[in-house]
Image (cartoon, grey):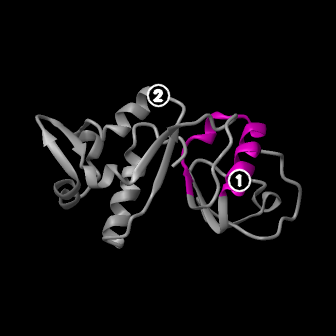
C-alpha cells in the first residue's frame, strides 16, 4: 500500500483478507513519506467514528477497540501490516508483490515522475501481479511499461513489453 497515509487502506486490506481466508498469515507493506501519519498508522489509530464510517458494524466489533470516542485497530490486524517510510520518487522498491495499491497518490506528480514510479511498480510485482491505482488516475502508457489493463483501476503485469521503460 504505497502512499498509505494514516493506515486506513492497508488495515482495510488486512481485514478483507482475514475475512476471506481466516488463519492465513497475509503480510502487507504500507509506506508513506509522512512520518507523523506512519506513526499514527503503526499505532492502529486512533480513528474517529467518521474515519471508519464505511466499515460494517460487524467488522468494527471484530477488529477495533473503542476507547471514549476513538477506535483503535486490534493487534491481530496490526501485526499483519508493516509500516515503512518511503519516498516513491527516490527510494528503491522491494520486489515480489502480488498486489500493489497506489491510489490517489500519483495525481500529485509530473508525468515523468509517474512514468518512473510505474516502472518501479512493474519491477516490484511478481509475474501476473496487479497494480491498483485511483479512479482519477490513468496509465496512458501501460502497454509500453508491460501492463495489461484489466479494469478501470487495475493493471496486470504481463511478461512481454512492447516498448521501453524508464529506468527506475
x and y, in percent, of residue 104 in the image: 55, 43
Residue at the image point whose x is 65% and y is 65% from the top: 126
Residue 6, above or below 150: above
- Residue under numbered circle 1: 139
Q: Magenta segment range?
A: 100-124
Residue closest to the eye, 138 or 45:
45
Residue 68, above or below 26: above
- Residue under numbered circle 2: 35
x and y, in percent, of residue 130 in the image: 61, 64
Q: CA distance from mark 1 to mark 2?
A: 28 Å
Q: Quadrant of the C terminus?
A: top right
Element type at marker 2? helix
x and y, in percent, of residue 4 in the image: 47, 42
Residue 114 part of the magenta segment? yes
Residue at the image point whose x is 27% and y is 55% from the top: 76
Left or right of 39: which side holds 91? right
Amino acid at each position: 500500500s504505497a502512499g498509505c497515509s494514516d493506515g486506513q487502506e492497508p488495515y482495510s486490506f488486512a481485514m478483507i483478507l482475514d475475512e476471506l481466508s481466516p488463519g492465513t498469515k497475509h503480510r502487507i507493506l504500507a509506506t508513506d513519506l509522512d512520518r507523523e501519519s506512519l506513526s499514527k498508522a503503526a499505532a492502529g489509530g486512533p480513528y474517529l467514528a467518521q474515519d471508519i464510517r464505511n466499515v460494517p458494524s460487524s467488522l468494527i466489533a471484530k477488529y477495533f477497540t473503542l476507547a471514549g470516542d476513538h477506535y483503535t485497530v486490534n493487534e491481530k490486524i496490526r501485526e499483519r501490516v508493516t509500516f515503512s517510510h518511503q519516498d516513491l520518487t527516490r527510494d528503491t522498491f522491494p520486489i515480489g508483490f502480488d498486489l500493489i495499491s497506489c491510489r490517489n497518490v500519483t495525481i500529485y506528480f509530473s508525468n515523468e515522475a509517474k512514468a518512473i514510479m510505474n516502472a518501479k511498480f512493474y519491477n516490484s510485482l511478481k509475474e501476473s501481479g496487479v497494480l491498483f491505482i485511483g479512479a482519477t488516475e490513468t496509465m496512458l502508457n501501460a502497454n509500453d511499461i508491460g501492463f495489461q489493463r484489466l479494469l478501470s483501476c487495475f493493471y496486470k503485469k504481463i511478461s512481454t513489453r512492447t516498448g521501453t521503460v524508464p529506468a527506475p
